[in-house]
Amino acid sequence: MTASKTSDSSGTLEKDLVVQNKMGIHARPAAMIVRVANTYSGDVWVEKDDEQVNGKSIMGLMMLAAGRGSKLTIKAEGPSEEGLKMLEEMAALFERRFEEA
Amino acid sequence: MIDIHSNNTKFVEAVTVREFYESFKEPLRMELVAGAAGLDKSILERSLNRPALALVGFFTAFAAKRIQLLGAGEMAYLRDKSAEEERGIMSAILERKVPCMIISRHLAPSKTLLELANKYKTPLIRSPLKSKTFTTEATLLLEEKFAPRTHIHGTLLDIKGIGALICGESGVGKSECALALIERGHSLVADDLTYIKRVSERELVGTSAELSRGYMECRGLGIINIADLFGVRSLRMDKRLDLIVKFTLWQRGMHEERTGLEECNVEILGLNVPAMEIPVRPGRDMARLVEVAAMVQALKKMGHDSAAEFNERLIAHMEQSRKKK
């Protein structure tokens, strides 16, 4: 199970997710993350260690070089109800291992 | 899935001898010597037959639907026979309703052969070409005549050697994009309506209608003459189809290809053509995007897939970082 929590601090929703697929966040998973992030009207940030990138940018996500086992924090800044839904979907996507091995 | 509206696929079932003779008289240097009454016979198969076995009386699996080619061997065999024997041999072949007969190397037909060709209303054609040359050339020309064809609502351009067909709804900006590409030095093959032929098992070739060649219709400008405006270099008669670019008006939430890793194809006349969908939005320079798309396709043909190469680099990098930990 993914170590995940949803916390609400000063209007920002956060969720910690672990990359579980064998090849990590390469181009295809990055495109899938962007597709989910784009459903949200607010800002989406993805953080790994101390690096933070825009969750709607494929290049940005790939530059995190998040291999298997990496811990990512997804942040949603904006409407909270919508944000919760988006984070749920994001968690489901990570849980499905981006439909990969 | 990219959908382009292609209909009206035509398969040519038969070509008349007249059509074959008149279209290819020059390239095949043919001369009709007898049997003109049979010019409306149909050629049902796109290859030639050397009737050597039929000459010796063996008719099992005889390809009677094909053009019969009498080469040096066949003609020498007939010369060796008496007129009566020749009549018997050739009647047996002609009774099987062959579409026409060709004599290669400018060999002279005997009186008997001329007479029989007239009697059986079977065109007899002479050519100075050698059998081998005639067969090769005629097969290629017949393949083209018999090629399945269709037409597609789209504009075909030659972008630095890549035949790119721009498709999309009316008013999405196909012609404007084509005009911008022509201005950049690429050539127009067909505007708005492209005729496509499957010339081999691997290749589709597009061309325009004879009547509209070199003309384009552009909203607000009307009909313009491309060769007059941009010079004859801006036109091309036909081009192999390498890439289909579909323009779609951009909508929120639509599927947009972001990585270039997904291979997409459109099937035309049974062959797969690489395809991509480019969303049209204000401020996007469509001509430049199509130009780059064509160059990406050219790179792929040479064995370089930018998207796949980049992804491999990334995966290798992640693998190494994991090992270091």
Image (spheres, grey):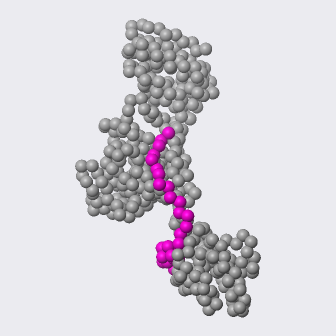
Frontmost residue, B193 versus B205: B193
Q: In this view, does A50 lie above or below A7?
A: below
Q: In this view, does B260 lie above or below B300?
A: above
Which residue is painted at 58% across and 82% down in the image?
B121
The picture quadrant where one finds residue B79 is bottom right
* Left or right: B216 in relation to A46: left
Frontmost residue, B53 versus B216: B53
Which residue is painted at 44% across and 55% down in the image?
B151
Total numbered labels: 0
In the rendered view of the protein, which quadrant contains the C terminus of chain B? top right
From this viewpoint, is residue B161 visible? no
Report if residue B21 lies within the magenta region.
Answer: yes
The picture quadrant where one finds residue B81 is bottom right
Which residue is painted at 44% across and 57% down in the image?
B195
Frontmost residue, B15 versus A17: B15
Report if residue B37 lies within the magenta region.
Answer: no
Name the spot of residue A27 as percent of width and height, x first. Answer: 52, 31
Which residue is painted at 34% across and 39% down in the image?
B284
Name the spot of residue B180 as percent of width and height, x first. Answer: 32, 49
The picture quadrant where one finds residue B108 is bottom right
From this viewpoint, is residue A39 visible? yes
Frontmost residue, B52 versus B312: B52
Question: What's the magenta region?
Answer: B1-29
* Left or right: B156 in relation to B304: left
Name the spot of residue B112 as percent of width and height, x first. Answer: 64, 90
Name the spot of residue B266 as percent of width and height, x first. Answer: 51, 46
